Image: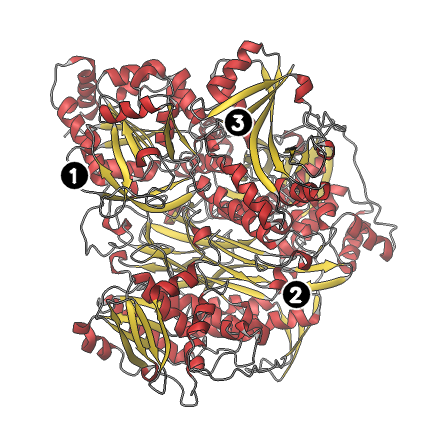
Amino acid sequence: MIKPKVCILRSAGTNCDKETAAAFKLAGADTESLHINNLVNGKRSLADFHILALSGGFSYGDDIASGKIFANELRFKLSDSLRKFIADGKLIIGICNGFQILVKSGLLPGGTTLKQNTSLIINDSGKFEARWVYLKPGSKCIWTKGLKQVIYLPVAHGEGKFITQDRAGLEGLKINQQIVFQYCNAAGRLSGYPDNPNGSVENIAGICDQTGRIFGLMPHPERHIFASQHPRNWNKKLKIDGDGLQIFRNGVDFIKEKFVYITGRGKATKNGAKNVCKKR
Amino acid sequence: MQYKIEVVDKPGIFDAVGQGVTRDILDLGISGVKEVKFIQVYILEGNLAIGQVISICQELLTDNVAQDYKILSSQEARGLAFNSQSRRPMGALAQHIIEVTYNPGVMDPVEASVLKGIQDLGITEAISVKTAKKYIILGKLSLSQLRTISEKLLYNKLIQHIVNLRTPEADTQRLPGYNFNLIKVDLLSASSARLLEISKRGQLFLNLNEMRQIRTYFRKLKRNPTDCELETIAQTWSEHCYHKTFRGNIAYKESKAVPKIGNKSIKNLLKSTIMKATRELDKKWCVSVFKDNSGIIKFDDQNNICFKVETHNHPSALEPFGGANTGIGGVIRDSMGTGLGAKPILNSDIFCFAPPDLAFNKVPTGSLHPKRVMKGVVSGVRDYGNKMGIPTVNGAILFHEHFSGNPLVYCGTVGIIPKNKSFKQTNQGDLVVVVGGSTGRDGIHGATFSSGELTHESETVSSGAVQIGNPIQEKKVLDTMLKARDLNLYSAVTDCGAGGLSSAVGEMGSELGAKVYLDRVPLKYSGLSYMEIWISESQERMVFSVPPKNIDKLIEIFANENVEAAVIGEFTGTKRLELYYQDNLVCDLDMHFMHEGIPQIAKKAVYIQAKHSQPKIPEKKNLTVDLLKLLGHYDICSKEWVVRQYDHEVQGGSVIKPFVGIKNDGPSDASVTKPLYDSNKGIIISNGINFRFGFIDPYWMASSCIDEALRQIISVGGSLKEVAILDNFCWGNPDKADRLGGLVRAAYGCYDTAKAYGVPFISGKDSFYNEFNVHGKSTPIPGTLLISAISVMEDVNKAISMYAKEAGNLIYVVGQTRDELGGSHYYDLYKALGNQVPKVYHDQAMKTFSALSRAAEKGLVSSMHDCSDGGLGVALAEVAFSGGLGMDIFLAEVPRVPILKRNDTLLFSESNSRFVVEVEKLKQKEFENNLQGISFGLAGCLTSRSNFKIYGLDGKICIDTDINSLKKAWGDPLKW
């Protein structure tokens, strides 16, 4: 069977690539951990993949600002192939530092404009914090399709406070249903610190672009794909799977539906076909 | 052309740095500061057009949503001397500007990143970048207050300086070049006095015997040594690298201590205690012990795991952030340098500080305040561990005034490594390849420096020993070396730690000999002499032994991810260490003399058991206040402020986390980690440390530390089937008989206890000379032993956590409580020590441990918590408030020795091998059947109310409170 191909794009300082790969594999994808140099120097091409995953870490040490230098590499070195990748109807997910990269590159919330108009700045607590948070879903994002219940994931970041350039920007996100997750308490009610660990406006934990195909969030779904990772469910008394797994399944299933099985629909499916050939 | 750019948060954006500094200024006891504003400064040099500078600002240096930028003219760009700062007369609210930048030659990782970012914009004209931090302090401050703030909070003169009118060029100053000049040291004609002077002057920390030995060696050769040869020997023979004390001869005397070790002359303390236990236990799952950079044990059929714990005390005393930063960086490299390279999967960190509320006048001259030290150390560990993507899952923090001049910073790393990659073998003809960071002047003399006492002058004398880490550099090396490892491209690898290349190449080539061309070592900047290159302890470097046929492939792999790798020599087979600089022979030493030539040292050790006054504490009816006070004791209280700053989830393997409970904020015992995504097998990590017992008897301190580490493993559902332990001794000056006497007793305590429990030592480390010397008067730290334990768990789904699970469940106390308040935290509340130090009763303890792990295995246990600091009372409270449930306890049911008649003794004695266990009513019978022949008592039960009640031996209530008050008392003290 053909599996969707995920590119987990690394740079110096990326450090959640392995668990992100594990999550996508569990969801039924093939993954490749690729250093960004290979795209910049043209040795490899984004076109060979269906999903681009920017995982967590400290790309380039978060020097200057978190995700900034990686984001600029995307903007100034890979913009064409990125625009094409998005135009082909493929998927992008950015987790933690990956979300910071998507925001600083302007891929979120604006898509291909590549102009930054939102940001993730230092937590109100003034420090890096690792804790588990409850998240309230609600958007048109394909990555969270079918998610109705509050889910439980860990955060671990120092610069996760989401802000928009202006009021209008925030309203836009609401109107276009681009707010994918909001921090909340166990009961799903919006509340303050520490339920909202960083002071994000409107408790925003994750957003998507207008197509719902580009998705970024501060919490780590890849760190809750097994029961054993849950602080109170390592013995599987509450449930079998981790809450984060569904997100990866959604991405993989979307690709299976759109690319891998159906043929004769433009360039993207040629890649699908190319994969078929590769497999044989 | 020079441009100075200032980046500042937009109005309304929370200035975290500024706010933090404002808080810290209050901690200094300085009020009257209204606000601190932080500004990030970049100084660009190069033939840049203003348009280019503007786009650099807009596209790279500024977050347009949150920040504004300003490009200053070269005139404004001049920093202002902070002693001519006050824009208005003192008294009124003045604006004080302090701008801090790194000293020339100190590595600032941001510079490289900014340069890369500029090139990504397609701008190639920038040649250099410097960064600076500018603080605008608004408030009523005297000059001396301003100076205090600057020196205590904003900069450390070892690595930074204040940009200042008098040195306008300081921040762009270039370092001088270097012209070769071979330096020889005249030993042949040197008198004994002269020999000692040479040792002292050169910070070699070699004693007269050793200097004489070296003189004899060179007299045979009929020539004087070069400075490089002398340094190489000093480093190889340093306490830090050779462990002279543990390997030397000790004449030991003791008086009326129990158990008796007896007066004896000890040949090699290490071999006759620590290593002896391992040899005699001879466990088949021990893969590599005391050989490599860390100890290796079996994990599963494909993989082994390795564990190493290091200390980085002296550097952390001088520069807390940099010291701890490079400490954790170094121990991570130890696991990267184990076998052919292990993948680090978790860290553990244990610290000892002086109390954070220590009065400023009690801080020794030349030392930093403990709160500053603690904040710096925690940030250092956070920065490096988080950026490497290694979860920090286990740790402890303890406090005592005698750590004020000399804190302890223990950093440990566990790695996982394929079975067939667990051993290394350097071959003749292999190339010497140095990989990773370039070499600079940082960390000169670290190895020898840690072999002497700190003094109030250390910060000036040994400033070179301070280093700054660059975790991303090390992460790059890790990512690439694992690729190279799996392609079998090299035959051996080790890390550059203390002693730098000298130590790394010296060790790798000890059998074969090596030839190194020092001018081929990549440098951070010009001006280093051949000798500085050789002994520099610049961070993030590894040395590989590479067969020539693989070199191109290896270098390509590193280059693909921007990691520098340089061939600097070869392993020869001449059994000599030959160093060249621009074709000049600068060192030619016989490897055998280097590694075996050190004269056996003989030291005296005396242990006289001190008699401490026994506190007279009146028996009280109500002990609620004492329990609350104990929960608030710095050793016992919540360390959440620290632990939350460490990422303990990265890599996705964390099962039993540092914090557990319904609100994830209860104190976990051991940590459980699941390193593989496709297997339920787990790794348990725990630690035991309690220097207070050592004040009474180091033998029982050691014994208790091992017991503590093991009972934590039992508490999370582990067993003693496969447990290995590590010893880390931090001690005073071993040349002083009384300090060494205590060490000997501790070592024998280690042997007896490890042997009895069947847990081998697989690695260890010692750090001596932990004394702080002010104007001739030397204070040793409390002799401190850290025992770290590692164990393999078959199925993490069977792990147990410490917090109360369900109202109605039964609470058992397992294990005997004895009249052992000596060294307890309860006595510490009364500033007393006592003499009844807790002992370890191995036979009973073994039965208890195995019975409880059987019960856990069978799923009979809902929660389990070990009793340690603060005794049974604290353990019960922690179980209750972590689970958010009330508790009723009846002390009359708690197993105890007959002579024990007081409630406070029963509640707060810190006797070893005891547990609080929660069991469902339905499982009561089966659980009790499992505990046949073990002292246990059904002491009470959990309630859905929040009341926490303990009924005394007389049946009358002696503790009456609720879990919220308990949790508050425990949670507040270190909530910063």
Task: Identify residue for label 2.
Answer: B248
Query: Element at badge 3?
Result: strand
Furthest-bottom residue in this view = B899
For residue B202, say whether it is visible.
yes
Q: Chain of mark 3?
A: B
Q: Chain of mark 1?
A: A
At label 1, counting other C-alpha atoms closer than 10 Å, the crowd grade (few under 14, some 14-19, many 20 or more) is few
Q: Amino acid at mark 2?
A: Gly
Q: Quadrant of residue B388?
A: top left
Q: Amino acid at mark 3?
A: Val
Query: Nearer the viewer's eye, disc 3 or disc 2?
Result: 3
Nearest to the observer: residue B540 or residue B833: B833
Query: Nearer the viewer's eye, disc 1 or disc 2?
Result: 1
Which residue is found at the position 66% from the left and 32% from the top? B105
The spot of residue B635 in percent (x, y) is: 49, 63
Task: Identify residue for label 3.
Answer: B8
Which residue is found at the position 67% from the left and 17% from the top? B74
Q: Chain of mark 2?
A: B
Nearest to the observer: residue B335 or residue B965: B965
Query: Element at badge 2?
Result: loop
Query: Nearer the viewer's eye, disc 1 or disc 3?
Result: 3
The spot of residue A239 in percent (x, y) is: 18, 51
**Cα–Cα span, label 3 and label 2:** 58 Å
Q: Is residue B491 above or below residue B882?
A: above
Task: Identify residue for label 1.
Answer: A148
Type of colouring: secondary structure
The lab-note entry on whether marks 1 and 3 share a chain reads no
Nearest to the observer: residue B880 or residue B200: B880
